[in-house]
């Protein structure tokens, strides 16, 4: 997950920014701030990988804030003014968005940040063991069953139970677990929630329609709630 900070002195703009962030599955909003001063206080206590930053704010401006940083996270500037674009790129920002920002343009900027974040993470972890082992265990049939993430096709929620459909097994593994719990165990870049009752491995998706996601010939429902999250994965609306 990319830990991000939203900074804008306009309440409506900040609310819209929070809403857009909530639609991108690989973003985790650490805080929403209406001033650079508040943002600085948050950064003293929290790890922040990405800042969505307005330029024109009272007191310290967004550009002055960037210049003041000794260690810079990724920055996506969101402003109503085009004339700061050149100056901002000299400050090595990740992207520059001009208000009003459409959702597809916002998602493209987030995907760009995600690529940079993964590139940096891969460089830092070249010689380190993987933090994600690629498997987990669930209770099923009076045993602890090992589930390999690459083997999961999709997961189906049934009240307090889930069915884990595997490529290697004819029958799904059934275990007592809330969908939210299993969703938190899965890498956001590999799995996507498409419905309150379905999580699908991106690797096994063969087609997407307005209200459906296909895994080979199997058609699964795509709800309005999760359509934007699917768009973030595919890069298409």
Image (spheres, helix red, strand yellow):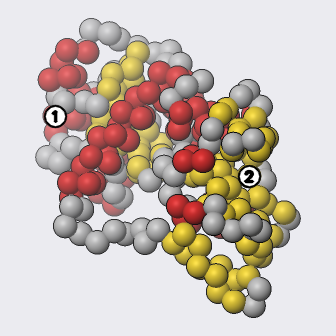
Q: Earlier in the sequence, mark 1 or mark 2?
A: 1
Q: Which residue is mark 1?
A: 67
Who's the residue at 63% across and 66% down the image? 168
**Labelled disc at residue 35:** none
Q: Determine whether the residue tagged by mark 2 lies in a helix, strand or loop.
A: strand
At 73% from the left and 72% from the top, the residue drawn is 173
Picture residue at 19% right of the left edge, 30% below the top = 92
Q: Secondary structure at mark 1?
A: helix
List x then y, in percent, for residue 135. 51, 72
Viewer can see residue 223: yes
**Residue 234 locus on image (x, y percent):** 53, 33
Residue 114 is left or right of residue 60, and the answer is right
**Image vertical order of residue 128 relative to residue 32, above or below:** below
- Of residue 50 and residue 15, the one placed in the foreground of this image is 50
For image coordinates 27% across by 9% down, the residue present is: 83
Please tell me which residue lies in front, 190 or 72: 190
Label 1 to label 2, Cα distance in Å? 45 Å
Q: Residues within 10 Å of mark 2 (few under 14, many from 20)?
A: many
Q: Is residue 113 above or below residue 171?
A: above
In screen coordinates, is 187 left or right of 161?
left
Query: Whole-percent x and y of residue 47?
Result: 33, 57
Q: Work out which residue is located at the far top of the displayed protein and give it.
A: 83
Which quadrant is home to the C terminus? Answer: top right
Q: Determine if residue 37 is in view.
A: no
Q: Residues within 10 Å of mark 1 (few under 14, many from 20)?
A: few
Residue labelled with disc 2: 198
């Amino acid at each position: 997950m990319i830990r991000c900070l939203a900074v804008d002195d306009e309440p409506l703009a900040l609310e819209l920014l929070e809403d857009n962030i909530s639609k991108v599955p690989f973003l985790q909003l650490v805080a929403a701030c209406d001033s650079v001063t508040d943002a600085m206080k948050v950064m003293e206590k929290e790890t922040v990988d990405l800042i969505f930053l307005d330029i024109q704010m009272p007191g310290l401006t967004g550009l002055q804030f960037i210049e003041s940083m000794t260690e810079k996270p990724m920055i996506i500037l969101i402003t109503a003014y085009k004339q700061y674009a050149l100056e901002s790129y000299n400050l090595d920002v990740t992207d520059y968005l001009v208000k009003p920002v459409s959702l597809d343009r916002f998602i493209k900027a987030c995907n760009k940040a995600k690529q940079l974040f993964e590139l940096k993470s891969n460089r830092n972890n070249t010689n380190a063991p993987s933090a994600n082992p690629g498997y987990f265990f669930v209770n099923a049939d009076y045993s602890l069953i090992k589930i390999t993430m690459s083997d999961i096709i999709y997961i189906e929620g049934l009240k307090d139970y889930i069915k884990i459909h595997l490529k290697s097994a004819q029958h799904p593994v059934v275990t007592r677990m809330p969908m939210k719990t299993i969703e938190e165990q899965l890498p956001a870049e590999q799995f996507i929630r498409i419905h309150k009752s379905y999580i699908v491995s991106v690797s096994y998706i063969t087609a997407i329609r307005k209200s459906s996601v296909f895994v080979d010939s199997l058609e699964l429902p795509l709800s309005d709630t999760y359509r934007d999250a699917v768009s973030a994965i595919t890069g298409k609306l």
